[in-house]
């Protein structure tokens, strides 16, 4: 065992995601099994700033593997981004003998973890977000549960659309990432899908609905990503005007984020949590555990952050300076792969509707 790691901490930060509890449990139990002490910080990074923590024993993580939300609570902590906030966080780690922190969350969480690592506190990031918007990873814990929840809701809307011969435009979460809207749209037989990544062809959608209606189809589902702002509501009005099919709008919002985690999310949480502890014991840090082609691998946390910015066209001057030409090429490859996946799936929507 690496003597450097005797006591580790775990926290959940950013939007909660089903499977976060299973992940905290995995980190805790894997660490305890290997002779480490575990601290849980409450309320994400704000727990670090305000010394809100608890020693986690075996029983403290009992009966949560199947629970949604996060029993450690979560926050989007603005103070943590300040120099003053960082000083408090470092002092808290030093005072409590914390050797490393496992941070479960999305891109904002990893930014925080990077800052901590850069200030000498070893961190491992685990991808917990319903959005599936970490470019370096094919998967984030919570994505599968959120999609299954959305499917259940859309199936219900479809029933009532069928009875009334209506269309329903359904807006789902995902921030700037259209993955939830796209994949649930395919799985629920949507007639059209509108996401930030691909320009939406309104005329084609209207024509499709008109043709299908003329052929006798009575229910129409259109999924829209919240990343398009108020577009979902506008689109519902436009569809009704252009096609004559009565159209309702439904915003699923935070409903997407609750509920018991699916098997996929529990398993991924268990595997990622265990791997985080193993990495720390190997003396590794400043890494994110990511899924690539069905396997868990690690990725430098800074790299993951920059590749995210590259994918989202948010690169700042100097962001790429620390990276070699090869690393930049691999970042571009990752972005291209992700874009191609979305385009491939998007093409399916039109084909199958
Ligand atoms: O990142 C997860 C997420 O649920 C996004 O899909 C959504 O845009 C955002 O969080 C909502 O955040 P909040 O709960 O703070 O309103």
Image (spheres, rainbow, N blue to C red):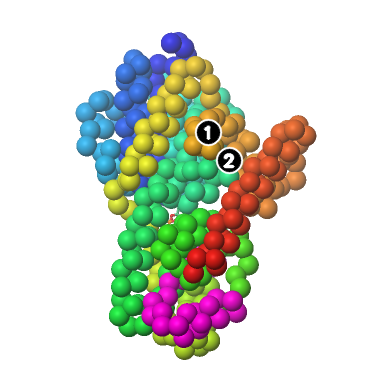
Tag 1 and tag 2, C-beta contact below 8 Å: yes
Q: Residue at x 69, y 37 (%)?
A: 330
**What's the magenta region?**
203-229
Query: Looking at the image, is mark 1 or mark 2 nearer the viewer?
Result: 2
- Residue that lies at the very extreme toward the right in this rendered image: 325
- Residue that lies at the very extreme toward the front in this rendered image: 215
**Spatial CA span between label 1 and label 2:** 9 Å
Q: Is residue 226 positioned above or below 81 on the image?
A: below
Q: Which quadrant of the figure shows ligand 1? A: bottom left
Residue 166 or residue 321, whichever sits in front? 166
Tell me the quarter of the image containing the N terminus.
Answer: top left
- Residue 164: within the magenta? no
Residue on which the image places disc 2: 136
The answer to which quarter of the image holds residue 153 is bottom left
Residue 189 or residue 308, whichever sits in front? 189
On residue 288, the disc is: 1
The tally of labels here is 2
Bin the neighbour count of mark 1 within 10 Å (Cα to Cα): few under 14, some 14-19, many 20 and up: many
How far across and how far down the image is residue 141, in percent? 42, 43
Queried on whether the Cβ of the residue with tag 1 lies below 8 angstroms from ligand 1, the answer reads: no
Label 1: state its secondary structure. Answer: strand
Q: Is residue 8 positioned above or below 16 on the image?
A: above
Bin the neighbour count of mark 2 within 10 Å (Cα to Cα): few under 14, some 14-19, many 20 and up: many
How far across and how far down the image is residue 185, in percent? 46, 63
- Residue 218: within the magenta? yes
How far across and how far down the image is residue 183, in percent? 47, 57
Q: Residue at x 68, y 53 (%)?
A: 313
> Is residue 8 at all visible to an observer of this figure?
yes
């Amino acid at each position: 065992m690496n003597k450097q790691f005797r006591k580790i901490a775990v926290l959940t930060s950013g939007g909660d995601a089903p499977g976060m509890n299973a992940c905290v449990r995995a980190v805790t139990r894997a660490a305890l099994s290997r002779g480490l002490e575990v601290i849980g910080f409450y309320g994400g990074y704000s727990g670090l700033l305000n010394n809100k923590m608890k020693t986690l024993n075996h029983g403290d993580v009992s009966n949560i593997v199947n629970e949604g939300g996060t029993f450690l609570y979560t926050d989007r902590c603005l103070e943590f981004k300040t120099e003053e906030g960082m000083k408090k966080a470092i002092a808290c780690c030093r005072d409590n003998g914390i050797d490393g922190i496992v941070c479960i969350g999305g891109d904002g969480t990893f930014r925080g973890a990077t800052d901590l690592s850069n200030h000498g506190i070893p961190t491992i990031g685990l991808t917990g977000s319903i959005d599936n918007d970490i470019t370096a990873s094919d998967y984030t814990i919570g994505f599968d549960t959120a999609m299954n929840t959305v499917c259940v809701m859309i199936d219900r809307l479809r029933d009532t659309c069928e009875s009334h011969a209506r269309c329903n435009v359904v807006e789902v979460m995902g921030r700037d990432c259209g993955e939830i809207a796209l994949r649930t749209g395919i799985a629920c037989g949507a007639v059209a899908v509108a996401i930030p990544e691909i320009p939406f062809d309104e005329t084609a959608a209207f024509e499709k609905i008109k043709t299908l209606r003329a052929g006798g189809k009575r229910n129409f589902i259109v999924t829209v990503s919240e990343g398009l702002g108020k577009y979902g509501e506008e689109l519902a009005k436009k569809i009704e005007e252009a096609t004559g099919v009565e159209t309702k709008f439904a915003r699923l919002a935070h409903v997407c984020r609750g509920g018991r985690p699916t098997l996929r999310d529990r398993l991924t949480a268990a595997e990622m949590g265990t791997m985080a502890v193993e990495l720390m014991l190997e003396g590794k840090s400043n890494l994110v555990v990511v899924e690539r082609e069905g396997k868990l691998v690690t990725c430098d946390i800074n790299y993951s952050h920059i590749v995210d910015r590259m994918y989202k066209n948010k690169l700042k001057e100097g962001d790429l300076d620390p990276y070699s030409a090869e690393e930049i090429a691999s970042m571009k490859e990752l972005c291209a792969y992700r874009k191609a996946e979305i385009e491939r799936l998007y093409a399916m929507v039109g084909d199958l509707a």
